[in-house]
Amino acid sequence: MTSETETWIHAGALRTFCQEVLKKLDVPEEDASIVADVLVTADLLCIASHGVARLRSFYVNWIRDGIVVARPETRVVAETPATAVIVAGAGLGHPTAFRAM
């Protein structure tokens, strides 16, 4: 049962919305998809502090303010068989972390 102040949105629709918002900020489609998936998954796991609520308050504002780069240049600066140091170029951390794994 939901209260009058709650709105339920299908996770797929929410992922699409988040992805489209990020793409409008010039985030590459693959990166936007990764970030959207992480945010929605956090909400689905009841970790609201790291979910979609951060989309505007953090990521949209940070990209608009130039704090985060929408299309960063990432590079591996050191690597061992078990570790790597990756410079993410002030980009969104989710795509770099995803690719690092």
Image (cartoon, helix red, strand yellow):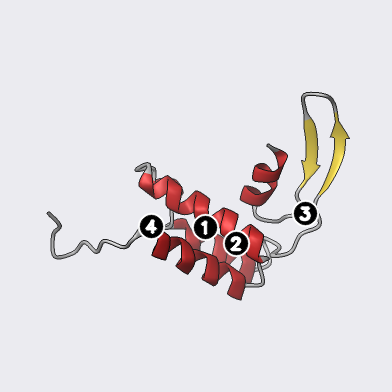
Task: Name the residue type under label 2.
Answer: Ala
Task: Count the marks.
Answer: 4
* Badge 1 or badge 4: first in the primary sequence: 4
Instruction: Specify the quadrant of the image occupied by residue 27.
Output: bottom right
Q: Which residue is mark 3?
A: 89
Between the C-alphas of marks 4 and 2, the distance is 15 Å
Task: Name the residue that disc number 1 marks.
Answer: 36
Q: Quadrant of residue 66?
A: bottom right
Q: In the rendered structure, which amino acid carries the disc numbered 4? A: Ala
Q: Which-is-in-front pick, marks 1 and 4? A: 4
* Residue 61 in view: yes
Q: Position of residue 61 (x, y in %)?
A: 56, 67
Does label 4 or label 2 sit earlier along the sequence? 4
Q: Mark 3 or mark 1, which is nearer the start of the sequence?
A: 1
What residue type is disc 1 on?
A: Ala
Q: Which residue is mark 4?
A: 11
Mark 1 vs mark 4, CA separation in Å: 10 Å
* Above-or-below relation of 37 to 65: above
**Which mark is nearer the camera, 1 or 3?**
1
For badge 3, the amino acid type reads Gly
Seen in the image, is 88 located left or right of residue 2? right
Q: Secondary structure at mark 4?
A: helix
